[in-house]
């Protein structure tokens, strides 16, 4: 069984700071995901049709989900592994958002 050392990581997404709990070995992938999401959200804001942060986040999520679902099988993309990672990131983000809500 592989032991994972879990720590916290401070990230900025769409000009907001979040502290995320993350296993050490997943930090590089999580940082890539943060950068990708941040870039997508800024692209959507620059278009100017979507205004609120919540709507921008939803549109970014939809765009990313569409990208994932339109990749043809067998083209270097392991959907099962990606789904596992997405679920893991969702848990981390949900946990972080709950912690952020406690601050206000």
Image: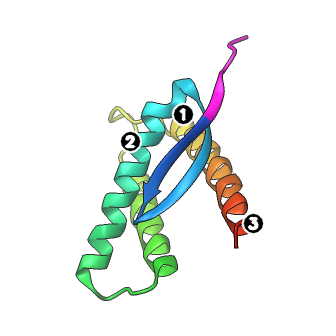
**Left or right of 96 in this view: 10:** left
- Residue 92 or residue 61, whichever sits in front: 92
Q: Residues within 10 Å of mark 3 (few under 14, many from 20)?
A: few
- Residue 29 or residue 9, whichever sits in front: 9
Q: Quadrant of residue 50?
A: bottom left
Residue shown at 48%/80% (left/top)?
55
- Mark 2 and mark 1: Cα distance apart in space: 16 Å
Residue 90 in the image, given as x and y percentages of width and height: 62, 52
Mark 2: which secondary structure?
helix
Q: Is residue 103 above or below residue 92?
A: below
Q: Residues within 10 Å of mark 2 (few under 14, many from 20)?
A: few
Residue 75 in the image, given as x and y percentages of width and height: 32, 35
Can residue 40 be found in the magenta stretch?
no
How many discs mark residues in the rendered view?
A: 3
Q: Nearer the viewer, mark 3 or mark 1?
A: 3
- Residue 50 or residue 12, whichever sits in front: 12
Start and end of the magenta stretch? 1-7
Q: Nearer the viewer, mark 2 or mark 3?
A: 3
Residue shown at 50%/73% (left/top)?
58
The residue beneath circle 1 is 81
The residue beneath circle 2 is 32
Can residue 3 be found in the magenta stretch?
yes
Whether residues under marks 2 and 1 lie with C-beta atoms below 8 angstroms apart, the answer is no
The residue beneath circle 3 is 102
């Amino acid at each position: 069984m592989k032991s994972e050392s879990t720590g916290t990581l401070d990230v900025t997404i769409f000009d907001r700071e979040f502290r995320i709990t993350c296993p050490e070995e997943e930090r590089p992938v999580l940082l890539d995901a943060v950068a990708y999401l941040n870039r997508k959200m800024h692209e959507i804001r620059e278009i100017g049709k979507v205004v609120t942060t919540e709507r921008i986040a939803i549109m970014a999520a939809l765009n990313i989900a569409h990208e994932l679902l339109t990749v043809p099988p067998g083209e270097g993309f392991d959907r099962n592994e990606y789904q596992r990672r997405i679920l893991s990131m969702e848990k981390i983000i949900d946990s972080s958002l709950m912690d952020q809500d406690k601050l206000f």
